[in-house]
Image: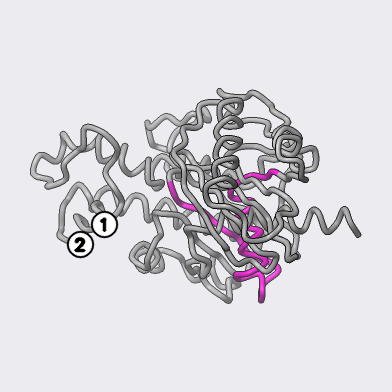
Amino acid sequence: MEKSVLAVDLGGTKILIGEVSLDGEVLGSKAYASTVVSQAQAFETIAASLSDYIKQVGLRREAAAIGIGVVGRVNTNEGIWLEIDPSRSQPIELAQKIGELFAMPCIVGNDVYCATLAEQKWGCGIYSDNFIYMNIGTGIAARCVVNGEPIIGRHFNAGEVGHHVVDCDSDIQCICGRKGCVELLASGLGMHNRIVALKPSYPDSAIVIPNEGRVGVEEIYAGYDHGDPLCIEVVDTALQAVAETIMNMVRFSDPDTIVLGGGVVSGSWFIDKLQPRLQSKTMRFVMNGVKKTVIDEAYIGLKGAAWLAMRTISKLEA
């Protein structure tokens, strides 16, 4: 019987469970509601969602392993999810617990690391050994691939570029302790928060702040196109913040390709507006340019978690 991998992509508001073939085809998937309050709570959600998926959706092939992508620091070799963020650290042996529960090998990794592995396997990695994958969604993070190897770091914290300061004069406080971080200005949540904070100064703006949820980037972009001054202020700041971050990353890892993913860059709108802000002298060696991932963004994390499990199992069996 052909094999597959059960994959888990844990986000801030939902968890996606899917079955992925060994060649990267998503054979089935189902989304579940999720609130990442703690690692212990997230484990319960992952376990319950996997159980439901197996019972309600079912497996088309024999699952050889489980691959899980989660937010925060992860020691993949030991299978330990170390923390969600510095203020919520409850290390948990997630791979062992899930593996024992479902009686199969389990591998866990950071979500953006997993997406980068997918990009390396099925995206720009086909032609590049030196690239940066940058995810701009609810938050912002990236991973650098240098000479074919994703950089992880001594404390499994490499690539947290959301905490790169792009405005030294900013008074916007970040949870990392500094001010003016790109995540505060250019992530989906960051742009919503800037809209809320600046709205009193733009009484003529057509943007309406919802009682629940947040102002979506599509609405902010539409306002920008219609000349809404609040949207123009927020988006121009976000675009410049991302441009500065990309140009700094280019200086320290010397990539030939930059790939962007995440909800903020869905479609071509954001990247089209971003390109003129990237200075040619800085970007001269990025021969393949800045582009949106060609992998379906709904599944890039899922496919990456699956590939993490596949390649780890292959190494152990070699």
**Residue that appears at 74% across and 58% down:** 310
**Is residue 247 placed above or below 47 in the rendered structure?**
below
CB within 8 Å, label 1 to label 2 = yes
- Please check the rendered image and state whether residue 114 is part of the magenta-colored stretch, yes or no: yes
Foreground pick, 84 / 305: 305
Mark 1 residue type: Tyr
Q: Position of residue 106 (x, y in %)?
A: 73, 44
Q: Is residue 62 left or right of residue 11?
A: right
Is residue 303 visible from the viewing direction of this image? yes
- Side (left or right) of 84 relative to 264: right
Please rate how many residues cluster around mark 1, counting C-alpha atoms within 10 Å: few if below 14, some from 14 to 19, many from 20: some
Of residue 133 and residue 294, the one placed in the foreground of this image is 294
Answer yes or no: is residue 75 visible. no
In percent of width and height, residue 19 lies at 61, 56
Q: In the image, is residue 129 part of the stretch drawn in magenta?
A: yes
Q: In which quarter of the image is the C terminus?
A: bottom right
- The answer to whether residue 145 is above or below residue 176 is below
Q: Is mark 2 on a helix, strand or loop?
A: helix
Report, in whole angstroms, how far the alpha carbon at label 1 lies from the one at label 2. 6 Å
Give the residue displayed 67% in from the left and 60% down from the top: 61
Which residues, given as a range, are shown in magenta?
A: 108-137
User: Residue most toward the left?
Assistant: 204
Give the x, y percent position of residue 155: 73, 36
Q: Nearer the viewer, residue 306 or 29?
A: 29
Residue for point 80% across, 37% down: 78
Position of residue 65 relative to residue 285, above or below, is above
The quarter holding residue 119 reads bottom right
Q: What element carries label 1?
A: helix
Residue assigned mark 2: 225
Q: Return the residue nearer the eye: 159 or 268.
A: 268
Residue identified by numbered label 1? 221
